[in-house]
Image (tube, coloured by chain):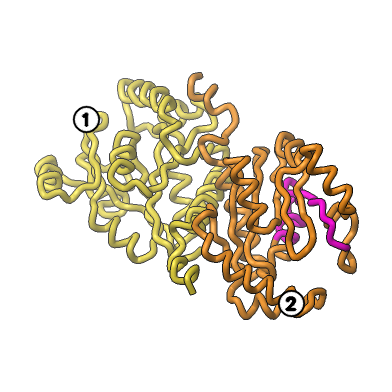
Chain colours: A yellow, B orange
């Protein structure tokens, strides 16, 4: 993989297996990394501050907004989530592929601000699978599960606002397709560094 | 790889190693195939009729044009080359990835007629390499080599009319990047079959 920095925005229904697929992708490629979001949601078991999220208080989150330190932020199921600007821009400049795993509204906020980000819809193999995964997670009550399922159905109406559609039939296949999308995007004429110099050489 | 038919138009300087890279790609993936062009050029040693080219007479070529059986045709270094419509369309409909290895003018004719074809510029690692390869081929006289080199330099000014830029640093790497481009294009929202039905399900 070459060193062209990219911003990958991956969204899709909660329970589609996004985290697992993206973790697989990132664990196998040192040039691809997560952006760590800020959130007011309490940590789930095994979640670490600074690794999975930057866990902040309501007051700290409001301060991030006021200081214009967020690329996007949303209120989701009673909690606030936001993407920190500086670490994302720094990493892209350093030639890294930064992956954002975010809810749809946040994803579209990013797209409207950074038009050359790559929008990927990660779809579950079927919606029954989504419901099963949400229940297996065991961290959400029935009301939240119903809310997430209803959102998942609504999100599918916006599929055409994404650039790519990857179905999570298997973790390896979905991860491989994401890698191909990254490599292909790095070959896009507009992204290849020094091509102008070469063209005029 | 899924079964979304695609048309890949690969162009770039003569001597950049296009044939070798594309042969490597096609030999390793049964769903990717060459389109066999028609030409009035005499066969080089080892070239087979119907495999490398459909070798036709001047009269037969004129007939193909008159019967509107060609997607594009060009006159290049005194010979005529053309892409046959029917086999290309039939293969794409059958879910195949059809690869056209053609000169730049032909490539742009294709693009103007089939806007969703994928235009790839296959670049040599450097121009010295191009000259070396042309001489090694041993099939062209000095005048033709000079003509091809001059064309190669001119072509680089049109790089921005392509979708992707792949540098032939090594056959395996270039072939792998082409494969990624194919896979990524098959994941593009507009190309995913039945996505509309799914979105409205």
Q: Residue A193 shows which numbered tag? A: none
Query: Residue A35 appears at what percent x and percent y?
Result: 32, 52
Same subunit, labels 2 and 1: the answer reads no
Residue at 68% x, 71% y: name it.
B148
* Range of residues picked out in magenta: B22-42
Give the left or right position of residue A191, taking residue A143 as reference.
right
Find disc 1 in the rendering and name its residue. A78
Instruction: Report whether residue A136 is seen.
Output: no
Q: Is residue B67 above or below residue B106?
A: above
Q: Residue B143 shows which numbered tag? A: 2
Q: Is residue A72 above or below residue B155?
A: above
Give the left or right position of residue A53, taking residue B183 as reference.
left
Residue at 41% x, 32% y: name it.
A13
Between residue B196 and residue A31, name the one nearer to us: B196
Q: Quadrant of residue B55?
A: bottom right
Give the left or right position of residue A197, taking residue A143 as reference.
right
Residue at 66% x, 75% y: name it.
B130
Query: Residue A130 appears at what percent x and percent y?
Result: 46, 29
Label 1: which secondary element: loop
Q: Is residue A66 above or below residue B105?
A: above
Is residue A154 rendered magenta in the image? no
Distance from disc 2 to disc 1, alpha carbons, whole Å, reads 74 Å
Query: Residue A178 appears at what percent x and percent y?
Result: 51, 48
- The chain containing the residue under callout 1 comes to A
Instruction: Report whether residue A81 is seen.
Output: yes
Q: Quadrant of residue B192?
A: top right
- The chain containing the residue under callout 2 comes to B
Residue at 44% x, 50% y: name it.
A23
Between residue B10 and residue B176, name the one nearer to us: B10
Mark 2 Cα within 10 Å, few/some/many (few <14, many 20+)? few
């Amino acid at each position: 993989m070459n060193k062209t920095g990219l911003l990958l925005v991956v969204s899709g229904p909660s329970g589609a297996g996004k985290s697992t697929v993206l973790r697989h992708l990132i664990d196998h490629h040192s040039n691809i990394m997560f952006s760590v979001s800020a959130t007011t949601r309490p940590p789930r078991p095994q979640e670490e501050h600074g690794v999975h999220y930057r866990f902040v208080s309501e007051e700290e989150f409001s301060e991030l907004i006021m200081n214009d330190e967020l690329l996007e932020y949303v209120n989701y199921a009673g909690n606030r989530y936001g993407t920190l600007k500086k670490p994302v821009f720094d990493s892209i400049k350093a030639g890294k592929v930064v992956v954002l795993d975010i809810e749809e509204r946040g994803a579209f906020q990013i797209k409207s601000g950074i038009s050359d980000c790559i929008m990927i819809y990660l779809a579950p193999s079927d919606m029954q699978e989504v419901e099963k995964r949400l229940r297996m997670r065991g961290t959400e009550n029935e009301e939240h599960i119903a809310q997430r399922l209803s959102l998942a159905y609504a999100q599918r109406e916006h599929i055409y606002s994404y650039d790519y559609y990857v179905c999570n039939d298997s973790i390896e296949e979905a991860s491989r397709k994401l890698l191909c999308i990254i490599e292909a995007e790095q070959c896009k004429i507009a992204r290849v560094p020094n091509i102008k110099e070469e063209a005029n050489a």
